[in-house]
């Protein structure tokens, strides 16, 4: 059982702009710094080290979309890693979108304040919708110029938003 639930898959993917256009999505701006990261598996205390290492190894992207349709379970430690990722992304001047949350995972994001912290307008059912939205609103929510350097690793970021209510 433990081996089965600790099987975490994280797949970073460049946006396929041609496929989106062919499927009828209106793309105003093909953002060169956009990346979709597909996450599958349970995000719990047993995989946080693996999750943290994989997220830290990603090339920094100005627009990062986490597709979490394959995540069936998340605990507070998994949410804290995602909070760290969000803080690092915002600190760099980037934006973060979350897609495909299953109902029980969505409830955990809401209960811990992560939906409010990330912003309700950053949650979508599909990566396609998030890509379309982000391409139409490129640069609107940016507070600082994007920096592709990663001064702090995620494990050094302070926590503070995620608490269980």
Image: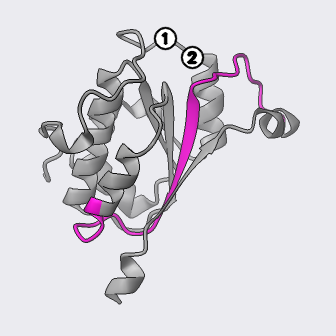
Q: Outermost residue, bottom direction?
A: 1
Question: Is 6 placed above or below 52 here?
Answer: below
Question: Measuring 57% from the left and 16% from the top, which residue is drawn there?
Answer: 137
* Label 2 crowd (10 A; few <14 / some 14-19 / many >=20): few
Please tell me whether residue 44 belongs to the stretch shown in magenta: yes
Q: Which mark is residue 137?
A: 2
For the residues labelled 1 and 2, the Cα–Cα distance comes to 6 Å
Residue 103 appears anywhere in the view = yes
Q: Position of residue 110 (x, y in %)?
A: 29, 47
**Bounds of the magenta span?**
24-49
Which quadrant of the rendered structure holds the N terminus?
bottom left
Question: Measuring 18% from the left and 45% from the top, which residue is drawn there?
Answer: 162
Question: Measuring 41% from the left and 84% from the top, which residue is drawn there?
Answer: 4
Question: Is 122 placed above or below 52 here?
Answer: above
Residue 151 occupies quadrant: top left
Task: Judge left or right: residue 154 versus residue 145.
Answer: left
Q: Are marks 1 and 2 in contact (CB under 8 Å)?
A: yes
Q: Position of residue 82 (x, y in %)?
A: 31, 46
Residue 5 occupies quadrant: bottom left
Please tell me whether residue 1 belongs to the stretch shown in magenta: no
The colour scheme is one colour
Q: Position of residue 132 (x, y in %)?
A: 66, 29
Q: Main secondary structure of the magenta part?
A: loop
Label 1 SS: loop
Q: Which mark is residue 140?
A: 1
């Amino acid at each position: 059982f433990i081996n089965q639930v600790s099987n975490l898959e994280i797949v970073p993917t460049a946006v396929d702009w041609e496929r989106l256009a062919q499927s009828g999505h209106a793309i105003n701006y093909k953002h060169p710094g956009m990346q979709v990261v597909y996450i599958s598996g349970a995000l719990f205390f047993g995989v946080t080290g693996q999750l943290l290492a994989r997220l830290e190894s990603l090339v920094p992207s100005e627009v990062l979309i986490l597709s979490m349709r394959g995540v069936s379970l998340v605990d507070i430690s998994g949410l804290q890693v995602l909070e760290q990722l969000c803080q690092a992304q915002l600190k760099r001047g980037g934006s973060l979108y979350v897609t495909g949350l299953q109902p029980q995972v969505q409830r955990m994001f809401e209960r811990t304040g992560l939906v409010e912290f990330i912003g309700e307008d950053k949650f979508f059912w599909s990566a396609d919708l998030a890509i379309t939205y982000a391409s139409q609103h490129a640069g609107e929510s940016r507070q600082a110029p994007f920096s592709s350097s990663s001064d702090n690793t995620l494990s050094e970021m302070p926590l503070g938003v995620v608490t269980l209510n």
